[in-house]
Image (cartoon, helix red, strand yellow):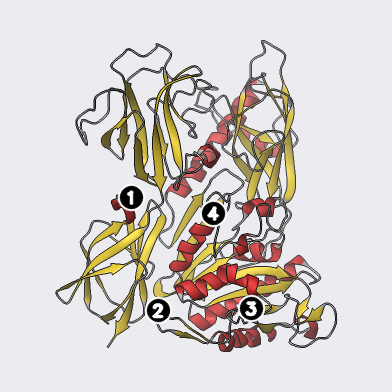
Amino acid sequence: MGRVWLFLAVLGILFLTATWATAANPASDRQHIVYFEGTAQELEIYKIYGRQEGPTIMILGGIQGDEPGGFLSADLYVDLSLQRGNLIVVPRANFRSIITFDRGPEGDMNRKFDQIKEFDPDRGTVEIIKNLMAESDLFLNLHDGSGFFRPVWESDMANPSRYGQCIIADTEVYTHPDSGRVLHLGQEARKVVDMINKHIPEEKYKFHFSNHDTLSPSSSHLEQRKSASYYALTKLGIPAYGLETSKQLPSLEMKVRQHNLAINAFMEIYGVIPEQPRVNLAPPTLHYLVISVNGELPVAVTDGQTLLVAPGDTVEVIHVGANYDRGLSADIQGLGSLNDIRMPLAITKPTTVIARRDNIAFGQIRVELLPPGSPSPQLQKTEAPLAVQAEAGSLQPTVPASLPSNVPLTNSVPDAPAIEAAPAPQGRYFVLEVDGQRVFLKEGGKLTVTKGAKVRLLDMKSPQPLPSGTVMNLKGFIGRPGDTTGNDLGTSAETGRDMLPRFALPGTKFPTYQLGAEDGSNLIFKAYLEIQEPVLKSVTLEIDGQTKVLALGRRYPVKTGSPVLVKSVSLEGDLPLVKPRFTLGGRVFPPNLPQTVTMPAIAVSLAVFSEGDLAGKVVLVPSS
């Protein structure tokens, strides 16, 4: 038992090391960003940059989770390489709805782009999608619609009220009031329709253009004014379309292929030169789940095995090993949420861990309780899978079978940097470190940081001695998985990914979390940590010797070939950028400002990022 357990543990560690190394060193032509990681709202974004400058097309799939043709088609473009232009791909905009195969468990997300309530669970995702649209030159929203759209009535399933097999736009021609840009949506959509239909031999499956005429008060589609495509068109002034295949097509593969035809046609029109993605709809297969018990060395548990733990042990699913890399979730039945990856949960009764790809359950393991006094964790089966046995003879484990999970806790952190933002205050306060800068947070006070900032919890100070059992607890942050004391002293919170949204205080404009000095159930004193999304206020440029301050979203003409000195950027609230990153037309330039860039012969976005989040952009357009 011991050798098998150790071998599976080593296998899990080796696999995780390779996976994390890949994630930490992405190829220079692409960027992978994950929001709400390990939750049912997990949002993965892929940015693919071509070798040559060109337009940026945004592909959005899965905003309604019961339309798999759209999100499976979008998923195929993630691994694409580009010769020219850029792609922003969001394969699964509404992961919760995909897992449940529902149009929208929290309501239709595609009706939340006009207004959305402050505490709507979809609010964060909607705002991120809006920011991504602002980086784009074309927006494509992928759907599976009912029936077959036809300009005139043919039957109950083929008529002007149906959605399937069409390209949808909100109007025939649109002139954006701010930029004056004229968009010939109908003309462009018909061109795409003609390109698609050359590859569809069956007349009944051919595409058509559907003008929803959403801007007209007499439109029968006024609800579309709340949609993502309407927002992109009217607020950002970029062409936006809904691509609809029919739910009545005979196979899922046909839906995916026809979405691909539409996307490829738009890419050809816009000059984004790709490699053709392949369709892979192989059934998902679970290889193993990598699981840590009580924060110790992970074990790789194969499909059908049973993991034995002691009552109260904390189980954390770290990774799902399968024949797919995306769209994966693990659900510990009766605990947590729909997606419990990287969520330490205490086991008090037998349960099952279900692995899913999108809405399809494709594997499971059992978790059973050991008799009192037994060591844990253990695997019930004593033989490794055949594939593992074949490799076991050549692998020499060199790591211990377990690691200590209890880290000694003290009332101070001695190795904090000496830099201090201000003199220590009077009374009770917390000592923190924000991105290397020491900060004192008074009792009842609030510290505002940029999302993505690293906050280290250093110390608690009080004129009166604190009880010996006092802990420093940042609610919504799990500093030490498996630690039931709630003591976060000495740990660091990555505010862009470590905070659990459900613990944010209600009624606050920005996510705000309580930081407390606690002795058991007694709250001795508290303060608050507020986390704000980075929002660009302005970019200061120097062009032809003149200083120009461009506000968020501003378009400015620059002579082709002219040098543009990017002097500084400013965020709303005068917050600092976290790990700043700047791009011009999708190309990265050094983050240490000022920097000089050259104006190309095409319109380009000068985008500002903070810890991978788009803060905003300004647009430079060529002038003669």
Q: Residue at x 85, y 82 (%)?
A: 155
Query: Where residue 520 sits: x, y (%)?
Result: 49, 16
Q: Residue furthest right?
A: 155
Toward the viewer: 178 or 164?
178
- Judging depth in this view, the residue of 395 and 475 nearest the camera is 475
Q: Which residue is mark 3?
A: 168
Total numbered circles: 4
According to the image, label 2 marks what residue? 178
Q: Earlier in the sequence, mark 1 or mark 4?
A: 4
**Relative to 23, does residue 243 appear above or below in the rendering?**
below
Mark 2: amino acid: Asp
Amino acid found under the numbered disc labelled 1: Lys
Q: Are marks 4 and 2 in contact (CB under 8 Å)?
A: no
Query: What's the CA distance linking mark 4 and mark 2?
Result: 26 Å
Residue displayed at 77% across by 88% down: 152
For label 2, the SS is loop
